[in-house]
Image (tube, helix red, strand yellow):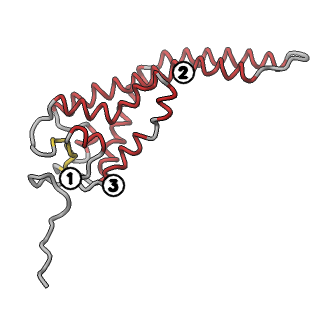
Amino acid sequence: MAPTPYAGPGPTTPDGVPLSGWWRRVSAYLIDGLLVGTASSLLTIPQQIRLQEDLDAVARRYEAELAGPGSIPDPASFFRDFMDLLLPVLIWSAVAAFAVWAVYSSLMLRYKGATVGKMALGLAVRLRDRPGRLPWSAILLRLLVQQGVLLTAFLPIVYLALLWFPYLDSLWPLWDARRQALHDKAARTNVVVVR
């Protein structure tokens, strides 16, 4: 029986650069998510303050209805008022998060080849078939597939229907032979180990 040839340390790009494992990718994404989440939260502070004030007014009105003699408050009315206040803030927050992700990841990937989280963990993003600077087209495709669901917040039913997609995208490298997430497949990129 012939010996099996040594396959190397794990999956690589066609030119032999090792691909990142799933846990390292997820850890990098969590670091980036913390940075982007903080920045987008800061952008939405005025809306959050206004929402809290408006929700307090709705709650006080509902409490007054409860305390009134013989009155029966309408929970459906309270819920409608609550959603009327909440939905615009949720939409604005999703758009702000997308904008921050877009600027952050686009500039970092174009000029550094990695986001802060990826750099901290010794990872980089490159085209699968060749090294070098990522083209804007690949960066845009990665962004739209990975974070595009945030743009559907204008259509709450569509947004709710697509909430599963980011999880599927994040899990995809676990069973993909090329260790690509769906956003990597769309852009023909790989996350590689550089140190």
| Residue in the picture at 25% in, 32% down | 141
| Residue in the picture at 12% in, 73% down | 5
User: Which amino acid, mark 1?
Assistant: Leu
State the image quarter where residue 3 is shown. Answer: bottom left
Residue 108: image location, x then y, percent? 22, 32
Judging by the rendered image, the residue that carries numbered circle 1 is 19
Residue 6: image location, x then y, percent? 13, 71
| Residue in the picture at 84% in, 19% down | 67
Above or below, 92 against 16 in this view is above
Q: Secondary structure at mark 1?
A: loop
Q: CA distance from mark 2 to mark 1?
A: 40 Å
Q: Secondary structure at mark 3?
A: helix
User: Which amino acid, mark 3?
Assistant: Leu
Q: Secondary structure at mark 2?
A: helix
Residues packed near mark 2 inside 10 Å, few (<14), some (14 to 19) or many (20 plus): some
Q: Does residue 120 appear to the left or right of 80 in the view shown?
A: left
Residue at the limit of the structure toward the bottom, as seen here:
1
The N terminus - image quarter: bottom left
**Labelled disc at residue 71:** none
**Labelled disc at residue 174:** 3
Judging by the rendered image, the residue that carries numbered circle 2 is 87
Above or below, 171 against 162 in this view is below
Residue 135: image location, x then y, percent? 14, 31
User: Which amino acid, mark 2?
Assistant: Leu
